[in-house]
Amino acid sequence: MPATRSSEEKHVAFLAFPFASHAIIGLSLLRKIAIAAPNVHFSFLNTAKSTHSLLSKSSADDVPHNIKFCLVADGVPENHVFKGKPLEPENLFLKATPENLKKGVEMAVAETGKRITCLLSDAFLSTSAAKIADDLSVPWIPAWYSFPSCLSAHIYTDLVRQRCGRSGTVDFIPGLPAMSVADLPREVPAPESEEESPFSRTLSQIGSVLPRATAVVMGFFEELNSPLLNHDLKSKLKNVLHVGFLSLSLPAPPLQPSSSDPTGYLSWLDSKKSGSVAYVGFGTLASLPREELIAVAEALQTSGVPFLWSLNEKSKELLPKGFLEKTKMHGKVVPWTPQTQVLAHASVGVFVTHCGSNSICESIATGIPLICRPFFGDHYMVGRMIEEWGIGVRVEGGVITKNRLLESLELVLRDEQGKVMKEKAEALKKVVLKAVDSATQEFNCLVDLISSAS
């Protein structure tokens, strides 16, 4: 008897957005789903460059047997010379969609002999993914990796453009605190020219496309949102599934013994007083201008605050002459850290960061207050939410100077207001840990949707 649609093996395609940390988080989500649904076959569609980067950072054992990689064109013309324009690779990739993604789906079907039964995608690819899902007549489930409040800003893009243009105060998005237009991702306000870039145009269409999705996955905890924001999102989207933070597992496993840490960083942290260390890390994409890099170094040297600074070798060469020698008794500058373990260490008292959503989620999960220097994208809006929660501060003026960072370090680590921030950060951590069960239930609903799709 031939297989029916309900009995045939399920084949799910995942459309990754191959820039910043999107593909990393997408693969992390898909790993969890693939482990929970071992009888479902998954095809992870991504560019060659991004896939190579992903696989170089993890062993084959980290990828479940039911996930296969399928390469798609990156849209870069042959012999193309990049001109250093903002978002140039992203715009070239999006110009090639949805045709390159369609070809990738066709390739995945040909290689497996199994038709697609469900389409997952990065929410940044919503317009193309919705079209492909319609053509295939299958359910479409996009995933949003940042704060739901940031998604809400994209959903209300048209209204922001109508009311504010490129300046003013946004105080009309349900469930969000009042904020400046400058706090929003730069793709939300009205474009500077009549010709909108593919990247900006794609994000501006999210609000009109997402309601067509079978469900929308949020890499966040519903309990961290305001009730009004949750109500508004659920009124606009069919099925909102808050599955918890995607970059780490909760509850977190016990902190590994410091003696087993090959870097020696945890042993160094063991020697410091509880809540005394400033952990400094601006991610892998954000790069401080030289003036600010020097300002950070000068503030750390002058303050005498114990510090652990994750800084790549290229940037390390820009540090003031003699800085490493002068601070060797109370600080360490290192090329990489096991960030989740560092943040979980009792000696860490503040995280100086760029406001990347992964880093912020890791900080929330460990109850660490923040000093924020946003750079781009959703960083400014995330920083605004941190202030709203009372668990940190943004550097005054958005630019680090020696005195501004000294003031922020004094405030968070030594001032009475810093103690309140720590209490609020610990309270938020408890909210997250209490919400793990409900997020697990939402994740199980997601797995059921995928497993039953036909």
Image (cartoon, rainbow, N blue to C red):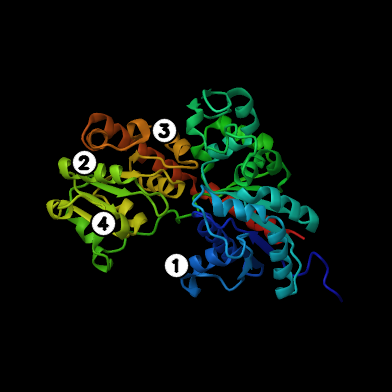
Kind of residue at badge 1: Lys
The quadrant of the rendering that contains the C terminus is bottom right
Crowding around mark 3 (Cα neighbors within 10 Å: few <14, some 14 to 19, many 20+) is some
Mark 2 or mark 4, earlier in chain:
2
Q: State the CA–CA distance, disc 2 to disc 4.
A: 18 Å
Give the camera-side residue of 36 and 128. 128
Q: State the CA–CA distance, disc 1 to disc 3.
A: 34 Å
Q: Is residue 30 above or below residue 174?
A: below
Give the camera-side residue of 166 and 367. 166
- Relative to 389, is 268 on the left or the right? left
User: Number of marks in the image?
Assistant: 4
Crowding around mark 1 (Cα neighbors within 10 Å: few <14, some 14 to 19, many 20+) is few
- Are the two marked residues, 3 and 4, in contact with CB atoms closer than 8 angstroms? no
Q: What element carries label 4?
A: loop
Identify the disc placed on residue 299: 2
Q: Is mark 3 on a helix, strand or loop?
A: helix
Give percent across and percent down for residue 23.
54, 58
Residue displayed at 38% across by 59% down = 253
Identify the disc placed on residue 317: 4
Mark 2 or mark 3, earlier in chain:
2
Kind of residue at badge 4: Glu
The label nearer to you, 3 versus 4, is 4
Q: State the CA–CA distance, disc 4 to disc 1.
A: 25 Å
Q: Can residue 384 be seen in this view?
A: yes
Crowding around mark 4 (Cα neighbors within 10 Å: few <14, some 14 to 19, many 20+) is few
The label nearer to you, 2 versus 4, is 4
Identify the disc placed on residue 57: 1
